[in-house]
Image: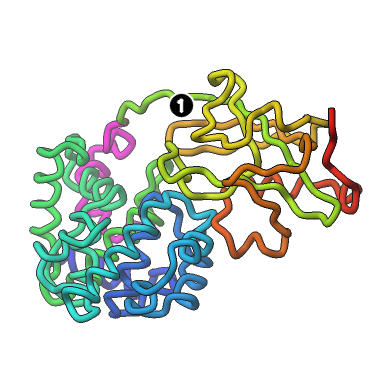
Amino acid sequence: MALRRKLLRWYNTHRRQLPWRDSHDPYRICVSEVMLQQTRVQAVIPYYEKFLSLFPDVQTLAASEERALLACWSGLGYYSRARNLRKAAQQMVRDWGGQFPKDYAEALRLPGVGDYTARAVLSIAYGIPLAVLDGNVARVLSRLYARKEDFRSHAGKEKFLRLADSLLAPRRPGDFNQALMELGATVCLPAQPRCGECPLQRHCLAYAREEVDKYPPPRRTAKPRVRRFVAALVQDSAGRCLLVRRPRSAPWMGGFWELPMWEQDGPDPPPLEIHCIPKEAIVLGRLLGRLRHSITSNHLRINVHEGFLRGRALPPRARWVLPSRMDHLPVTTITRKAFRLRPASTIGRPTEVSI
């Protein structure tokens, strides 16, 4: 098929050099695919390299402690991915001799491995002819065949997978899948696509109709919710920072360490099952800066204040942490950003007050 040949020839010449690209190790491919879920390639690269330096194989990951895993993943977001990856490694060691299963149905039994990840790993690592479908692939197919179905719907997904399967190069399924994804990521862009550089331009119905901008049709998205918080950066005389640990049952970032923080428009007093230090235990000082951060559909606006602790007693989920030790703990991205606001003048000053 001419379309396959053109796409694979383009991919051979124009593909990006990525650290996981030339590997056929199913473990490394699985790690990269899980990290790439809802995360930009450039953001993933340093985390991928760090992750493999600490957890070079399935056995090492399976035997790891969750705290070390989350500390390594800290900043990448969507932390259930890391926890599920560890559970999947443990299952691979227990049930499949430390190998990613070659059977599609068995691969789906791994925690955190869904249809896309199973197809990607099996096609790239083992050469099994299974097409993949993600946002990039769906956009290419939508324009190529002028299809307006929503690939996220059950019916739409089935139709797009049938299209992808019909195109799949049986002798190079992994390369073909990566080529389609690469085309969507670098040429067939959501806005301002580079049609002049596309190897499939002559096969594209949307281009022939001069309707590329109509495919795929825009989907309705929920309006993000803006939430406002106050965070307290409390230091002791040794320059240590006061952190509290979020419970595993928290709505997000369960088990992670963060600055004492409360929602401005939240319940008063804030629930201690989430914020283990009551507001009354912290005296807020000057404003150090303002942060913006997004978690799923929540847009967070955080005012970071210098803080002072009333008394000396700490609740069970709080501790003093040296800046040099933060990389050894799973710390929220918000806290890492806030810590950069730390005024040098506070180091060495006592920050406990009695009122």
Instruction: Give the residue number, with chain letter if any, for mark 1.
Output: 224
Please give the range of residues in magenta: 198-218
Residue 307 shows in this picture: no
Going by the numbered disc 1, the residue's amino acid type is Pro
Please tell me in which quadrant of the rendered image residue 142 appears.
Answer: top left
Q: Is residue 113 magenta?
A: no
Between residues 181 and 64, which one lies in front from this camera angle? Answer: 64
Q: Position of residue 238 (x, y in %)?
A: 83, 56
Compared with 118, 287 (above or below) is above
Judged left or right of residue 177, residue 196 is: right
Compared with 108, 123 (above or below) is below
Helix, strand or loop status at disc 1: loop
Judged left or right of residue 29, residue 303 is: right
Between residues 38 and 272, which one lies in front from this camera angle? Answer: 272
Question: What's the residue at 74%, 41% (across, down)?
Answer: 233
Report crowding for label 1: few under 14, some 14 to 19, many 20 or more residues within 10 A (C-alpha).
few
Q: Position of residue 349 (x, y in %)?
A: 90, 48
Q: Is the image coloured rainbow, by chain, by secondary structure, or in one colour? A: rainbow
Judged left or right of residue 135, residue 141 is: left
Residue 199 shows in this picture: yes
Question: What's the residue at 84%, 46% (across, down)?
Answer: 343
Q: Is residue 214 magenta?
A: yes
Question: What's the residue at 78%, 30% (across, down)?
Answer: 283
Which part of the image, by quadrant, shows the N terminus? bottom left
Q: Position of residue 124 (x, y in %)?
A: 24, 72
